[in-house]
Amino acid sequence: MVVDAKTVRLKAMDLLARREHSVKELLRKLSERYEEWELISTVVSQLIEDNLVSDTRFAEMYVRSRIGKQFGPIKIKNDLRERGVSDHNIKLAMNEADQDWLQLIQKLSKKKYGETVPSEAKETAKRMRFFQSRGFDSDSIRFIFK
């Protein structure tokens, strides 16, 4: 089957209509469907030029979304790096969000564990692992146990 730029662009637009994508994600998804790398690259470059795909916009949306799901800064940054977003765009998005991470971990702790205090070391370690898996740093985690 011969694929032209219009077909690739329509598929890209279909993907972007569902949610924001990073450039890397969009390239990966299109290359899984089509084999013409040159064509895919050209179409995605045009989408960038038309401001229809933007790593900056994607990072801002992703950070807001993950904060809403109570994920910490470490996990958010790592997820964005995996999706091909530059450290510069990650830093901009994190600054834009202006999140109080201690407040967020307190809210998460209250939601998950209520007002209970861990009674033994095993339970404390379990909670610490949970907060680490959510992407909070050790200082924030220690703060929650004070």
Image (spheres, helix red, strand yellow):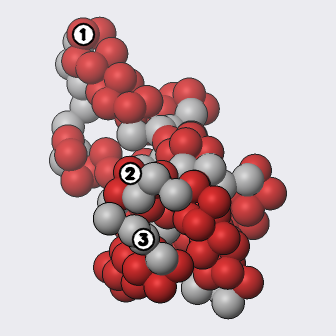
Mark with earlier residue (3, 2)? 3
- The residue furthest bottom is 50
Q: Point out the image quarter for the N terminus.
A: bottom left
Q: Are marks 3 and 1 in contact (CB under 8 Å)?
A: no
Query: In the rendered structure, which amino acid carries the disc numbered 1?
Result: Lys
Q: Residues within 10 Å of mark 3 (few under 14, many from 20)?
A: few
Q: Is residue 73 visible?
A: no
- The residue furthest right is 88
Q: Position of residue 101 (x, y in %)?
A: 55, 53
Calculate the distance from the C-alpha at mark 3 to the C-alpha at mark 2.
13 Å
Residue in view at x 62 percent, y 81 percent: 47
Q: Judge from the rendering whether residue 68 lies leftward or rightward of residue 23; answer left or right.
A: left
* Secondary structure state at the residue bearing disc 3: loop
Label for residue 32? 2
Calculate the distance from the C-alpha at mark 3 to the C-alpha at mark 1.
58 Å
Which residue position is annotated with label 1? 122
Q: Position of residue 38 (x, y in %)?
A: 63, 60
Q: Position of residue 126 (x, y in %)?
A: 27, 20
